[in-house]
Image (tube, rainbow, N blue to C red):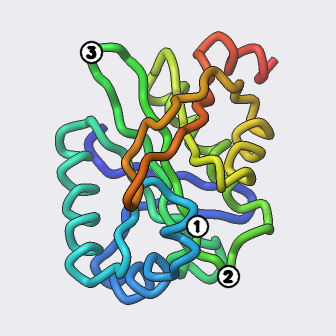
């Protein structure tokens, strides 16, 4: 893949985050609700965090081990959030990660974006498996995984350090054959 991919759904365009997105990224990622519902989003979120994230996007694409997209409405084209796959090349699998700005919650955008990313991962990258995790406080994240056919595989107890303690994670997954059976 020579050029950064662009994915389209009925309402969304997933494409490369741009330097001009930095003000929106900082504003949206800086919302404490985003920090509360994601694994590792820093708070406060600063310009240098957004710059680092965009650099990671570009390096990941260059290395073919990280495909991270900006989520945008097709009509407005403004930045709404991020979604991507971190590739484990040696095992032909990826971990899906995503976040969406609070003003866009509860509108089905993440469900739609996940569907596009699963298709990209299985049909374009030919991955064998895609997994995703969420923290117990983010029940809605598990629901969108299930809506896309992902299956709960595990509870990882006290898996991540969070604040002064630890948090568990719920892991969902989908294999290539499970994806193919959904498509038929």
| Residue 21, above or below 7 | below
Determine the residue positioned at 26% across, 84% down.
47
Is residue 40 something that shows in the picture?
no
CA distance for labels 3 and 2: 38 Å
The quarter of the picture where the N terminus appears is top left
Residue at label 2? Answer: 103
Residue 36 percent coordinates (x, y): 54, 66
* SS state under label 1: strand
The quarter of the picture where the C terminus appears is top right
Observer-nearest of 170 and 78? 170
CA distance for labels 1 and 3: 30 Å
Residue at label 3? Answer: 90
Observer-nearest of 145 and 152? 152
Sooner in the amino-acid sequence: mark 3 or mark 2: 3
Is residue 47 something that shows in the picture?
yes
Residue at label 1? Answer: 100
CA distance for labels 2 and 1: 8 Å
Left or right: residue 56 versus residue 161 is: left
| Residue 27, above or below 179 | below
Q: Residues within 10 Å of mark 2 (few under 14, many from 20)?
A: few
* SS state under label 2: helix
Sooner in the amino-acid sequence: mark 1 or mark 3: 3
* SS state under label 3: helix
Residue 129 percent coordinates (x, y): 51, 20
Q: Residues within 10 Å of mark 1 (few under 14, many from 20)?
A: some
Determine the residue positioned at 61% across, 55% down.
8
The residue at the far top in this view is 177
Residue 42 percent coordinates (x, y): 35, 69
């Amino acid at each position: 893949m020579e050029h950064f991919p662009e994915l389209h759904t009925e309402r969304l365009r997933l494409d490369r985050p741009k330097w001009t997105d930095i003000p929106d990224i900082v504003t949206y990622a800086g919302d404490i609700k985003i920090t509360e519902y994601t694994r590792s989003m820093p708070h406060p979120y600063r310009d240098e965090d957004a710059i680092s994230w965009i650099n990671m996007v570009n390096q990941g694409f260059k290395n073919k081990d990280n495909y991270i997209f900006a989520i945008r409405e097709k009509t407005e084209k403004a930045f709404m959030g991020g979604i991507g796959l971190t590739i484990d090349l040696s095992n032909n699998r990826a971990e899906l990660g995503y976040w969406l700005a609070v003003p866009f919650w509860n509108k089905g955008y993440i469900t739609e974006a996940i569907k596009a990313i699963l298709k990209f991962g299985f049909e374009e990258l030919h991955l064998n498996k895609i997994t995703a995790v969420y923290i117990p406080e983010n029940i809605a994240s598990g629901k969108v995984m299930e809506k896309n056919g992902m299956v709960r595989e595990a509870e990882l107890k006290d898996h991540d350090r969070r604040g002064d303690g630890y948090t568990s994670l719920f892991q969902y997954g989908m294999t290539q054959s499970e994806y193919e059976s959904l498509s038929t």
